[in-house]
Image: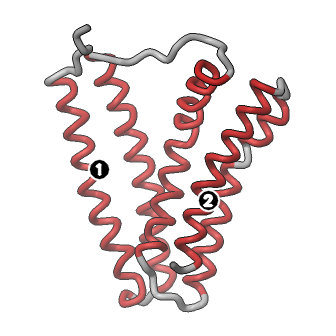
Amino acid sequence: MNFIVWSIVACEIAFWVVIGLGFIARYLLRQKTLGLVLLSLTPVIDLYLLIVAGIDMYYGATATLAHAVAAVYIGVSIAFGKSMILWADERFRYYVAKQGEKPEKRYGMEYAAHYMKGVLRHVVAFAIGAGLLYLTHWIVGDASRTEVLIQTASKWMLVLGIDFLIGVSNFVWPKKAKST
């Protein structure tokens, strides 16, 4: 595996470690400021990945799927980061710190509306990630070195379209609560 792949893996691990440590500091150690500082490190992780991938391409690397995934990761992290942290925070607070109320499951139109908000976040993630892919393609100026970036953006657009159709289907066929 090359350095970019390892960087993506390290960034994903670091993202969840920093979040976990932030929650531990916030809820178990009662250090709210330290928890906030740790949670605010997540954008630094994205910045590191952006710099590493950019430097690699600048020095002549031919883009690989790892470079494309780095852009996807950054877009997803920016668009979904806050909601992922809130989701994890709610569960950590209830299941680990034994505080607050049990996270509720959504059904029906509430679930459909929530899912569609996720689709909108997906659109933002796509705009950021695909923007980085196309920007890198343009800056490098050598289509033979950046072909995989454009292919990834095209495939991601297909995934986004499927996600949108699933979102719409939730309004047509609402998710029902399981029978007990």
Left or right position of 10 against 31: left
The amino acid at mark 1 is Leu
* 60 to 24, vertically: above or below: below
Mark 2 and mark 1 in contact? Answer it, CB < 8 Å.
no
Q: Residues within 10 Å of mark 2 (few under 14, many from 20)?
A: many
The amino acid at mark 2 is Cys
Q: Which of the two marks, 2 or 1, is nearer to us in this view?
A: 2
Q: Which residue is mark 2?
A: 11
Q: Quadrant of residue 19?
A: top right
* 108 to 172, vertically: above or below: above
Q: Give how far across and how far down residue 27 sits, in percent.
A: 75, 24
Taking the spot 46% from the left edge, 72% from the top edge, the residue there is: 66
Q: Nearer the viewer, residue 24 or 148?
A: 24
* 105 to 138, vertically: above or below: above
Which structural element holds mark 1? helix
Q: Quadrant of the C terminus?
A: top left
Taking the spot 64% from the left edge, 24% from the top edge, the residue there is: 96
Q: Nearer the viewer, residue 108 or 149?
A: 108
Q: Residue furthest top?
A: 180
Query: Where residue 160 is drawn, which disc sits there?
Result: 1
Which structural element holds mark 2? helix
Q: Give how far across and how far down residue 69 sits, in percent.
A: 45, 65
Q: Residue furthest left?
A: 172
Q: Quadrant of residue 168?
A: top left
* 135 to 21, vertically: above or below: below
Left or right position of 64 against 55: left
Left or right position of 177 against 119: left
Real-space CA distance between mark 2 and mark 1, rounded to the nearest whole angstrom: 24 Å
Taking the spot 33% from the left edge, 24% from the top edge, the residue there is: 113
